[in-house]
Amino acid sequence: MMLSCKDVTRLISESMDRTLPVGTRIAVRFHLLVCRFCARYRRQLHLIRDTVQRIVAAEDAFGDATGGGLSEERRERIKRALEAR
């Protein structure tokens, strides 16, 4: 049985927080081979995650050059959430 797009998008989101079971990963990958829309959704989620990680890393390394960045509390929350993955 092939997963629906609704199932796959939910599983793609979940896979960013935890490792999916092998059978589920295989089913998702098969769906991604035949569904360009879900494949695009996956790429977009990864792009967003990677961009946020780079922003946080740059702010940690260089400070906020604009002077109007995230508060220290928000920065710490983002770091903890990324490290929890």
Image (spheres, rainbow, N blue to C red):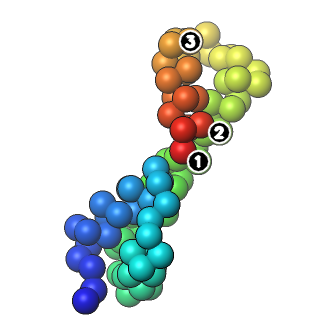
Find residue 45 and report its horizontal and vertical position in percent.
45, 55
79 to the left or right of 16: right
Q: Find disc 3 in the rendering and name its residue.
A: 72
Q: Find disc 2 in the rendering and name its residue.
A: 54
* SS assignment at label 1: helix
Which residue sits at x=39%, y=75%? Answer: 24
Q: Disc 1 and disc 3: Cα gap in Å?
A: 20 Å
Which residue sits at x=34%, y=73%? Answer: 37
Q: Who is closer to the viewer here, 64 or 19?
A: 19
76 to the left or right of 9: right
Find residue 63 and report its horizontal and vertical position in percent.
71, 17
67 to the left or right of 49: right
Considering only order in the chain, which callout, 2 or 3, is on the residue closer to the N terminus? 2
Number of marks:
3
Q: Residue furthest right?
A: 61
Q: Find disc 1 in the rendering and name its residue.
A: 50
Q: Quarter-wise, where is residue 3 in the image?
A: bottom left
Which of the two marks, 3 or 2, is nearer to us in this view? 3
* SS assignment at label 3: helix
Q: What residue type is disc 2 on?
A: Arg
Find residue 13 and report its horizontal and vertical position in percent.
38, 56
Q: What residue type is disc 1 on?
A: Asp
Q: Is residue 44 visible?
A: no
Q: Is the Cβ of the residue at disc 1 closer than 8 Å to that at disc 2?
A: yes
75 to the left or right of 59: left
Considering only order in the chain, which callout, 3 or 1, is on the residue closer to the N terminus? 1
* SS assignment at label 2: helix
- Quadrant housing the C terminus: top right
